[in-house]
Amino acid sequence: MKSPFMGRKNKDAPDGDTGAGMDDVAIEVVTGDRRGAGTDCKVFVILHDDKGRTSPSLRLNKRFTTNCRAQTCTFRKNTGLPSLTSVSKIEFWLEKFGMGADWFVDRITVTVLATGKRSVFPLTRWVKPALDHTFMLTNDCLLPQETPNSLRAQRMTELGYKKAVYKYICNVPGGPAQVRRGSR
């Protein structure tokens, strides 16, 4: 039986092109290999270049076979940004859909096809569907005191979640600390 979703793409367009212009970036998404790491949510990304320009939201899903555990997915997209040379920041988010909403992302790599410039965004974390977008800088491995002002609110929220998970209490004076009941 033929899928009803086949044939929606513009058949006269070159491979990977939907008729809206030529693809100018390749976005490689690596899902982690942890149990339950894949997602069936709708994943969106917005690219920011070094000139302060932003792309429209780009969807990073292809039906039901993408973003599975230990899988690398590559998406060729048209950003609509003329003369794009490099990507300095991304923002992405998940829309809650289906049973497997949480997603363990290892890294996202954006390659500008015209220049061959690669930007790596290492996440190595669980991402949950939320109203807020997650922002990442190229090679994002900053100490808290070196976090740019534009990302401080996001960093403080993430640290607040970690503090709530790792609350300890000492039930016996002079004894070892234990995890507070209900904190995990």
Image (cartoon, helix red, strand yellow):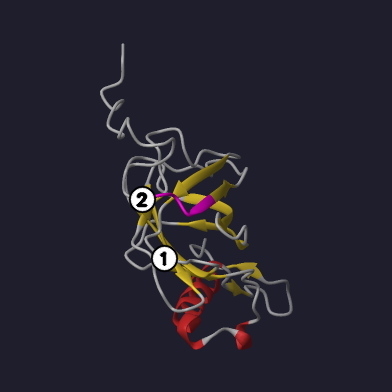
Residue nearest the viewer, comparing 44 with 21: 21
Magenta residues? 22-27
Under mark 2, the amino acid is Gly
Residue 98 lies, in percent from the top left, at 33, 40
Tell me the residue that label 2 is attached to. Answer: 21
Q: Residues within 10 Å of mark 2 (few under 14, many from 20)?
A: few
Q: How many marks?
A: 2
> How far from the left and from the top, in percent, is residue 130?
35, 61
Q: Compared with residue 14, is residue 176 higher up or lower down, i.e. above or below? A: below
The three-letter code of the residue at mark 1 reads Pro
The residue depicted at 64 percent of the width and 78 percent of the height is 142
Sequence-first tag of 1 and 2: 2
Q: Residue at 55% of width from left, 57% of height from top?
A: 114
Asked whether disc 1 touches disc 2, contact meaning CB atoms under 8 Å apart, the reply is no
Q: Which residue is mark 1?
A: 82
Q: Is residue 113 above or below residue 175?
A: above
Q: Is residue 67 above or below residue 133?
A: above
